[in-house]
């Protein structure tokens, strides 16, 4: 299974692609989409969608995992990030990529077994699990890989439940 993880944003959208075969996890690619704050929102959303379409066409994920919006101190920021997330979801739907959403708490829990882990702990787990030489930068890219790993963990648990294995 190939999973595309996405950390939505307006200025930076992190993305990461991983493959899961049995218990083996392989990093395929990761990066970010960056938009200029000088562009109108409609152009920024168009850039996000266009770049995301290219990533999906290149890597052909079977499923995607997108971080849910949970809490923002800045009300202006939440609106623009919500617009970017909506654009991302529409792009995934248009390209028939199955979507799943996870809250920051679920992602932290899946990677560190602690829902209140800090960003550095989550990033270290991404580096460790994927056997990367360094933590991916910018942070949004590492976050996107964390979302993909969260989804992989969730799918593994669902497969165990479906097979009738008791925990």
Image (cartoon, helix red, strand yellow):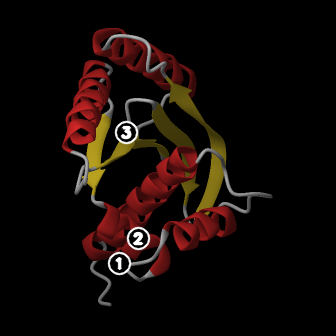
Instruction: Identify the element where label 3 is drawn.
Output: loop
Query: Residue 119 location, x and y as percent?
Result: 50, 66
Q: Residues within 10 Å of mark 3 (few under 14, many from 20)?
A: many
Task: Report the Cα–Cα distance between label 3 and label 2.
Answer: 17 Å
Say what secondary structure mark 2 lies in. Answer: helix
Q: Which disc, if any, is residue 115?
A: 1
- Front-most of 14 and 39? 39
Sequence-wise, which precedes: disc 1 or disc 2?
2
| Disc 1/disc 2 C-alpha distance (Å) | 5 Å
Circle 1 residues within 10 Å: few <14, some 14–19, many ≥20: some
**For this rendering, which residue is in front, 78 or 92?**
78
State the residue position of label 2: 108
Residue 65 placement (x, y as % from top left): 36, 47
* Label 3–label 2 contact, CB within 8 A: no
Instruction: Name the residue located 46 percent from the left edge and 34 percent from the top edge.
Output: 13
Q: Which residue has dot 3 on it?
A: 8
> Is residue 62 rendered to the left or right of residue 2?
left
Counting residues from the N terminus, which is met first, the one under dot 3 or under dot 2? 3
Asked whether the residues under the numbered discs 1 and 2 touch, taking CB atoms below 8 Å apart as contact, a structural biologist would say yes
Outermost residue, right side: 133
């Amino acid at each position: 299974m190939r999973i595309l993880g996405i950390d939505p944003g307006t200025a930076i959208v992190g993305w990461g692609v991983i493959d899961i075969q049995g218990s083996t996890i392989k990093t395929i690619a990761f990066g970010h989409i960056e938009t200029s704050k000088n562009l109108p929102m409609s152009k920024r959303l168009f850039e996000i969608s266009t770049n995301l379409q290219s990533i999906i066409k290149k890597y052909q994920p079977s499923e995607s995992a997108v971080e849910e919006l949970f809490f923002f101190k800045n009300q202006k920021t939440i609106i623009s990030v919500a617009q970017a997330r909506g654009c991302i979801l529409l792009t995934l739907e248009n390209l028939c990529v199955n979507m799943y959403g996870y809250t920051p708490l679920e992602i932290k829990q899946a990677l560190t077994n602690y829902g209140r882990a800090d960003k550095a702990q989550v990033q270290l787990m991404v580096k460790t699990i994927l056997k990367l030489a360094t933590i991916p930068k910018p942070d949004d890219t590492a976050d996107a890989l964390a979302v993909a790993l969260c989804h992989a963990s969730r799918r593994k648990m669902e497969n165990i439940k479906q097979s009738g294995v008791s925990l």
